[in-house]
Image (cartoon, grey):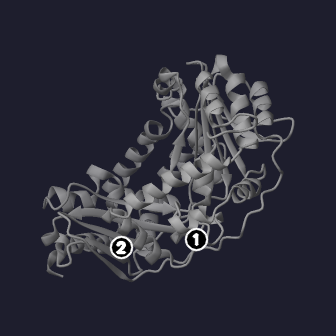
Amino acid sequence: MTTIALRSAAAFLLIILSLPLAVGAARAEVDIREITSQKGVKAWLVEDYTIPLIAINFAFKGGTTQDPAGKEGLANLMTSLFDEGAGDLDSDAFQEAIDDAAAEMRFSATRDAVYGSVALLAEQRDEAIELVRLAINQPRFDEDPVSRIKSQIVASIASRELDPQTQAARKWMEGLYGDHPYARRDQGTEKSLAAVRADDLKAFHRRVFAREELHVGIVGAIDADTAGQVLDKLFGDLPEKPELSNVADAELNLGQEIRVAYDLPQTSLQLAWPGVKRTDPDFFAAYVMNHILGGGSFSSRLYNEVREKRGLAYGVNSYLVNYDHASALSISTATRPDRALETLKIIRDEVERMAASGPTPEELEAAKKTIIGGYAVNNLDSSAAVASTLVELQLSELGIDYIQRRARLINAVTLEQARSVAARVFSAEPSVMIVGPEDAGGG
């Protein structure tokens, strides 16, 4: 994912972006209201007057999977151009204006959505919002900026071609997802970017920037009536419905071994099993089980077996991957080439042990406490973090009361459920990627 940030003269804005939200947020008791503007634009709002800042995050469904064939990188390029002129303002004039407005604005494209965010000072709200409105509704996509940003992206692509981990990540995605859009290169290629014209950017913008698949989170020094006016100004004139291409669910290509030979001082290991969808009734059981296996960092089984007992790696992690059209459970680590296969065997042995008997009662209770206690720190510790969390909750259709329900959902996970989901996930033969010297581990 590539993120382009607009310049801001107000350096202290970057500091207050990370300042804590009100005391209530630290207790995970965020008061979220759903508001609807006069033009029907919905958002989740958290009023907080601790600091004179407003953070607005938003997402439109439809990310890089919407890139037309042969024009991969289109979505990423578009999000890199919103600070390069809008309305009557060319690139220089727009950037000078956003600088004067003391605002920080970002756009980015992921596989499933186009994201945007703005952080602004309450006293300069009107000036900043007007510029964001222009960027969202009237991006210019002028020839000179398009050519310049293309060149920058192509240079980045060329540089990354020399990076073994980038090459390995590409082979991994292609191996797992085959010809599904998730296997595409989000940045595109020199050839695909050369095919992109201003009309393509404008057409993509029209197709994706629409109200029906828009999700907005607003946090800070702003009341509901004023927030509604801001919503109408930013989004009220967009088309009602997007024109998104259908994206099929992906089937993971499991049971394969991918070898990427590079003369590196360490060998990287990556494994993938089927995941659990975010909407699956077993999701929380899978989340807790994964925390015990490798998601809990220093407290996890994999960390204990791979690092603490044997010193084979600096770290080892397992994590749930949840896209709109695919889910996976992955494990990754890096170790000495001559001990790569030993490390891989230890990982697989621990996975088999989890699949066979699941977690212990003590592990389950300890994991629940850690997961519940860490949520506020990781997701609710600043205005920007809360605004981002509000958008993600909407995209995942978790409900406005999710933060209040989350602890109960986790505490409700039983030992039987955790064991069952472990057996279910790890019943498949994983895909494995080994990146390093060709004779790593003697294999």
x and y, in percent, of residue 145 in the image: 60, 46
Residue type indicated by callout 1? Pro
Q: Is residue 361 above or below residue 230?
A: below
- Mark 2, secondary structure of its residue: helix
Residue extending furthest toward the top: 123
Residue type indicated by callout 2? Ala
* Quadrant of the rendering where the C terminus is positioned: bottom left
**Residue 72 tag number:** none
x and y, in percent, of residue 28 in the image: 52, 34
Q: For this view, does 320 lie left or right of residue 392?
A: left
* Residue sitting nearer the eye, 114 or 343: 114
Q: For this view, does 199 lie left or right of residue 264?
A: right
Q: Is residue 23 above or below residue 166?
A: above
Q: Are marks 2 and 1 in contact (CB under 8 Å)?
A: no
Q: Residue at x 58, y 47 (%)?
A: 80
**Residue 181 tag number:** 1
Q: Residue at x 38, y 58 (%)?
A: 159
**Residue 355 tag number:** 2
Displayed quadrant of residue 226: top right
Residue extending furthest toward the front: 144
Q: Residue at x 66, y 70 (%)?
A: 247
* Residue sitting nearer the eye, 130 or 304: 130
User: What whole-number distance in Å separates the C-alpha atoms at marks 2 and 1?
Assistant: 31 Å
Q: Can residue 414 be seen at all in this image of the molecule?
A: no
- Mark 1, secondary structure of its residue: helix
Q: Can residue 40 be seen at all in this image of the molecule?
A: yes
Q: Which tag, 2 or 1, sits closer to the chain's start?
A: 1
x and y, in percent, of residue 400 in the image: 66, 43
Q: Is residue 97 above or below residue 284?
A: above
Nearer the observer, disc 2 or disc 1? 1
